Image: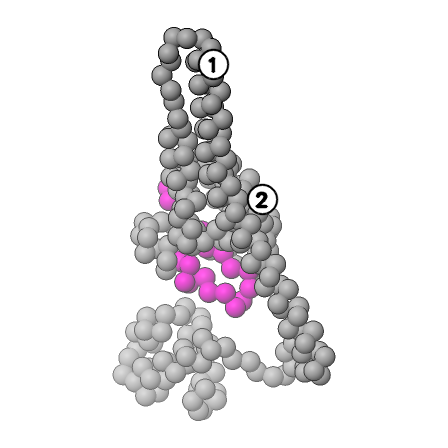
């Protein structure tokens, strides 16, 4: 079984993009969505996959990026090693250099030297080749660790910039957070409503609700929510 794992931890992130990327590379993947989780263990959907791994029912897991697997470097590397040890292939669309196929190639390409028949020479060559193989393997592992460390650093940098932005706004006397009673609209919502108005026969278009849903690319619940709001507003959003 091939799984595609998508995860977002904030409402500003787009899980559809991750799913689209995974399906483009692995059309038969069973996509699992994890919505609004933290960086550690509060991932019920991932726990389900882990149980499937334990029972031997998972052949491959595909991630849009390493940050979707884990944004904690230590935990991410340990999880990678555990899955690799279980025989699960891992693919990271944005970091293919750490796919398990690459890691396995490092293991398969370890150096070996034919015996010479001289005990002293063979002992020396065995020591040298063993050291070289450990070095090659360590390089491969370090590349994996660096990918998770970079992901963790990006999260830390984002949190730092957010804190600095809030502090700057506070010092400038600007209101922080959403103001009570004020209606906020995202860019995605505004664009979706424009497409609904343009294409729906309820407004300026010629298409049915089902057709407009496909055109806009939103769920049925979201579509009818937007449509009700537009009818209540009585004007272009």
> Which residue in the protein does label 1 denote?
123
Is 70 placed above or below 158 here?
A: above
**Quadrant holding the N terminus:** top left
Verify whether residue 16 appears in magenta: yes
Mark 2 lies on a secondary structure that is helix
Q: Where residue 15 sits: x, y (%)? A: 45, 62
Q: In the image, which residues are magenta?
A: 1-19
Is 122 placed above or below 43 here?
A: above
> Which residue in the protein does label 2 denote?
75
Name the quadrant containing residue 158: bottom right
Is 12 placed above or below 9 here?
A: below
Verify whether residue 164 appears in magenta: no
Q: Where residue 214 sits: x, y (%)? A: 32, 70
The residue sitting at 41% across, 62% down in the picture is: 17
Label 2 crowding class (10 Å Cα cut-off): few <14, some 14-19, many 20+? some
Mark 1 lies on a secondary structure that is helix
């Amino acid at each position: 079984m091939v799984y595609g794992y998508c995860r977002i931890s904030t409402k500003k992130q787009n899980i559809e993009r991750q799913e689209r990327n995974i399906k483009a590379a692995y059309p038969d993947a069973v996509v699992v969505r994890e919505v609004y989780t933290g960086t550690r263990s509060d991932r019920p959907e991932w726990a389900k996959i882990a149980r499937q791994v334990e029972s031997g029912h998972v052949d491959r897991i595909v991630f849009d990026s390493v940050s979707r697997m884990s944004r904690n470097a230590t935990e991410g590397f340990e999880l990678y090693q555990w899955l690799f040890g279980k025989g699960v292939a891992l693919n990271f669309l944005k970091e293919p250099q750490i796919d398990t196929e690459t890691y396995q190639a490092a293991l398969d390409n370890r150096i070996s030297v034919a015996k010479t028949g001289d005990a002293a020479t063979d002992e020396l060559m065995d020591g040298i080749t063993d050291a070289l193989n450990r070095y090659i393997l360590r390089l491969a592992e370090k590349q994996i660790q660096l990918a998770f460390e970079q992901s963790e650093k990006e999260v830390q940098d984002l949190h730092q910039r957010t804190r600095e932005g809030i502090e700057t706004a506070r010092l400038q006397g600007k209101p922080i957070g959403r103001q009570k009673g004020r209606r906020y609209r995202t860019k995605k919502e505004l664009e979706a409503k424009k497409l609904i108005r343009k294409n729906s026969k309820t407004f300026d278009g010629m298409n049915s609700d089902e057709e407009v849903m496909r055109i806009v690319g939103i769920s049925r619940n979201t579509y009818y929510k937007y449509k009700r709001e537009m009818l209540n507003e009585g004007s272009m959003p």
